[in-house]
Amino acid sequence: MTPGDSLANGQRSLGDPDIGYPLWPPLTSGCPRTSTDEVAYPLEVDYTYEKVDRALFTRPGHVNRGDGHDRWAPLLPPLSAPGLGEGGTPLVEIGDGVFIKDESRNPTWSHKDRLNRCTVSAAVGVGAEGIVVASSGNHGASAAAYAARAGLRCVVLGSDSMPPAVDSFLNAYGAVVLPVPQEDRWPLMRRLVDRLGLHPVSNLTVTHTGHPFGPEGYKTIAYEVFTELGVPRAVFVPTGYGELLYGVWKGFAELKRLGVAERTPRMFSCEPAAGGPLAASLRSGRLGAPIEVGPTSAYAIDCSVAGHRGVVAIRESGGQALLVSDEEMLSAQSEMARQGLWAEVSSAAALAGLRGLGGFDGPVVCVSTSSGFKDLAVGSRRSEPVEPTWEAVAGRLRKAGFPA
Amino acid sequence: MTPGDSLANGQRSLGDPDIGYPLWPPLTSGCPRTSTDEVAYPLEVDYTYEKVDRALFTRPGHVNRGDGHDRWAPLLPPLSAPGLGEGGTPLVEIGDGVFIKDESRNPTWSHKDRLNRCTVSAAVGVGAEGIVVASSGNHGASAAAYAARAGLRCVVLGSDSMPPAVDSFLNAYGAVVLPVPQEDRWPLMRRLVDRLGLHPVSNLTVTHTGHPFGPEGYKTIAYEVFTELGVPRAVFVPTGYGELLYGVWKGFAELKRLGVAERTPRMFSCEPAAGGPLAASLRSGRLGAPIEVGPTSAYAIDCSVAGHRGVVAIRESGGQALLVSDEEMLSAQSEMARQGLWAEVSSAAALAGLRGLGGFDGPVVCVSTSSGFKDLAVGSRRSEPVEPTWEAVAGRLRKAGFPA
């Protein structure tokens, strides 16, 4: 099956869906007409939906894993940057109709690869010589990998508290890593964009808008879930800025719009209880000033501001913004590991959200965003050496509950 | 497509292919009739090949990634343990017909998951309450994950020099981790098998034999490569004990035997030059006593003894046993990372082997076994903080070659 070219035809404001812009250049600072000093509105990509061949979703065809996003090219922005076999991750059932969508199987072992295939393609599309990203985690590493693959330079504005393993990760791809204090990242990023013409692949605005092409890449999660499982009752998503939440939602909404699916799932955002700007925004009825975020191990999703995309996904899907405690995330992390899936604490937010709510009638998908290797606590050795005698070994096993 | 049940019908000695045994129990201490005090011969699994439906390889059909090994069930031992969506990893082209088979996309981010779905299935098949594995790396973590998934206990005999990150990894799956001196691992393992009835999923013999069901899981790499690419000219494999090398070879040999493929690829083992027991065995004409292994960063494949499987794969395929230096592996690791694929040093042995030999006429596959996150050097921070001023940032970028 050759899916063909992108059917993207423009950008549309999420601040006012009647406002459209051409597809190029990507408006990386949000919608210029609807954004205010307090709230920035993102853009999404629009497509010539009437030209989409529905067989894209229903025709069985041999799928090469290396194809990655190319399989879904008509419903993505132009994929000008080469891929790495992003997506195509397995759904693993952990019992009672609960499926984990294991995004740690991506090229850089997180969901961010789906986004960065699209953002780096945008950088290639505008002829940029490089990209810049503010991140001290999965997003930066993924951007660095796709930039390397495309032959573009990559500058990562990291933070001074960046985990050393992430630093190794970023350096491996040849990125220039600049650890700077957290509060200096955005002004420096703006200057790198303005002065050096680097294409920004992370956020530049007061409330989160990010890159307009990025969340499109997350739609493929919905397409994949649909082809394997149909439409689940609910989807639970670890939520920082809400890009993943929105992307998955948009994918399902498109399937309904195209007449391929009859309904859509309810979307549940799962934020750390230590913060939770999306939950706060929904309570107050508006996106607003940064909230205070307390200590949490869920460093990948401990955001102080929300984005309008998350609001749209929750409202349109009839979903709910959940808050999960660190204790609940650690418990969910452990539950998944006992099923053979080692996810980082932030990734376990989805299952934690589901467990807090109780059961659903029908299949439920929890998106697990990344690998346990990414956690900060990894590398703190836990196992005590044991004397190499049978007595000592048997003693340790008895302690662990073995009938030794 | 429902591939159906296993067609496995027995075990066959690699010491003498005329010697067969029933399928159960798996002979985890090698072939009792051909093994000697100096050389142990492994067993392989035999199948009722005439009942294999060739459409398994040629019929396009929707493939759910979560199916994992189940897709190939007829040509695998009975899959009694539940899967985690193992295999189905992408082939990523890095130019000039060179494809990387990226095994870091597996459930525990290494090729070992293909093996452990089979070994843990064997443990379930014999009714064992648990498994035991001697490993301080990928193999142990993968075994622990599959044991957890199957509800079996898992004891890992680690080493006293085990990387702390691996320790976290093993503990996450609920394994009992016992760090003991290297030389005490095998005697303790034998006692754990004999006294507690734990099923061994790593080697118990003088020259390597390992678990007879294990390498069968690696055949699926050949099946996947074939369905995407046909038969490549050559396959390069990072080689420790030669189980992966043999499994991939056997998969291609089966495709020819079944009349699905017309030829087989040449197999190239890639061992660290610091050791290289397979290359030494082929030079001397026999498997023998342990060789000395010098210092190398390729800790996943720094073995002191070879196994007969590797000899078979190289001889039957008309291949070659290559030695690669740490420098060559680091260079190949860097080459892959600049294409967006961050592999551990050991994984880069395959591409290092290819680069040492030069070009091939036709597609070549290099198996990359695991993720860069597994390397010992990960976590040694490399990026110097930078003052958050434009001058300091611009200075750092100029040093990195930017026209800032």
Image (spheres, coloured by chain):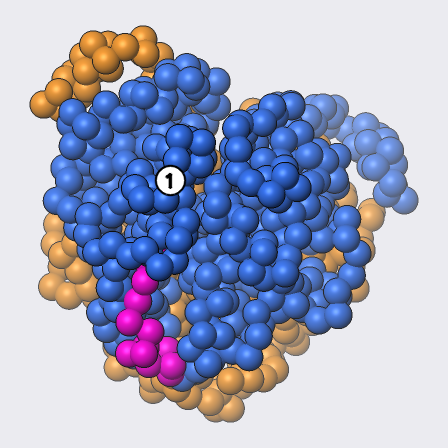
Chain colours: A blue, B orange
Answer whether residue A49 is magenta in the image: yes
Query: Is residue A98 visible in this depiction of the protein?
Result: yes
Residue B337 lies in quadrant: top left
Q: From the top left corner, tell me how far across and down residue B18 is, in percent.
A: 51, 77
Answer whether residue B278 is magenta in the image: no
Which range is magenta? A44-56
Residue B390 lies in quadrant: top left
| Residue A88 as seen in the image, left or right of residue A394 | left
| Residue B130 as seen in the image, left or right of residue A220 | right
Rendered view: A399 above or below A334: above
Rendered view: A247 above or below A252: above
Rendered view: A132 above or below A92: above
Query: Is residue B247 visible in this depiction of the protein?
Result: no
Of residue A10 and residue B118, the one placed in the foreground of this image is A10
Report the residue at 50% width, 67% height from top: A252
| Residue A69 as seen in the image, left or right of residue A396 | left
| Residue A105 as seen in the image, left or right of residue B335 | right
Q: From the top left corner, tell me how far across and down residue B381 is, in percent.
A: 40, 18
Residue receiving disc 1: A35
Q: From the top left corner, tell me how far across and down residue B128 is, in percent.
A: 78, 59
Tell me the crowding category of disc 1: few under 14, some 14 to 19, or many 20 or more residues within 10 angstroms, Cα based.
some
Report the residue at 37% width, 78% height from top: A56
Report the residue at 13% width, 20% height from top: B404
Q: Chain of mark 1?
A: A
Q: How many marks?
A: 1
Report the residue at 31% width, 8% height from top: B387
The amino acid on which the numbered mark 1 sits, given as a three-letter code, is Ser
Secondary structure, mark 1, is loop
Q: From the top left corner, tell me how far across and down residue A107 is, in percent.
A: 38, 49
